[in-house]
Amino acid sequence: MPLLRRTSAFPPVSARMVLLSVLMAGSCATAALFFLVSRLETRQEELRFQELAQRRFTAIRIGTEGALAALHAVNQLFAAMGTVSGEQFSIYTRPLLRAHPYLVALGFQRNVLAEDRTAYE
């Protein structure tokens, strides 16, 4: 039986070249996947940070609006009653301080003109 010789249009490739080609293709695929996953993780962290920052900003805004509402309420007390005693002020502001724990205190200071000072004291 005669041996058939195979002829090919491609020159014979050594095993070393095949291994080198597979190694290079694998390295390129690994580098591409690393780059894509890295960008994905970075984007997820940025979104998480933005969400946390938005939550904090909203909490601060709500607290500030609450404090301003309390101050406007105290201002309306003086506008409605004119002269307010220290005891009336304390009675009025006590629930406001309980409702807004981030307010440390609401102070009562009366402005007295120099010529009225002796009459006030």
Image (cartoon, helix red, strand yellow):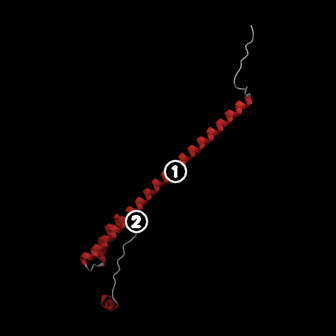
Is residue 84 toward the left or the right of residue 19 in the image? left
Residue beneath disc 2:
102
| Residue 60 locus on image (x, y percent) | 41, 62
Kindly identify the residue that appears in the image at 30 percent across and 90 percent down: 119
Instruction: Please name the amino acid that badge 1 sits on.
Output: Glu
Give the secondary structure at mark 2. loop
Residue beneath disc 1:
45
Instruction: Assign the C terminus to one quadrant of the image.
Output: bottom left
| Residue 55 locus on image (x, y percent) | 43, 56
Name the one closer to the observer, 2 or 14: 2
Name the one closer to the observer, 40 or 29: 29
Q: Is residue 93 above or below residue 109?
A: above
Q: Is residue 113 above or below residue 3?
A: below
Residue lying at the far left of the rendered structure: 80
Kindly identify the residue that appears in the image at 36 percent across and 75 percent down: 107
Which quarter of the picture shows residue 98?
A: bottom left
Q: Is residue 27 above or below residue 87?
A: above
Instruction: Please name the amino acid that badge 2 sits on.
Output: Tyr
Kindly identify the residue that appears in the image at 31 percent across and 67 percent down: 95
Comparing labels 1 and 2, the label whose residue is closer to the camera: 1
Name the one closer to the observer, 90 or 40: 40
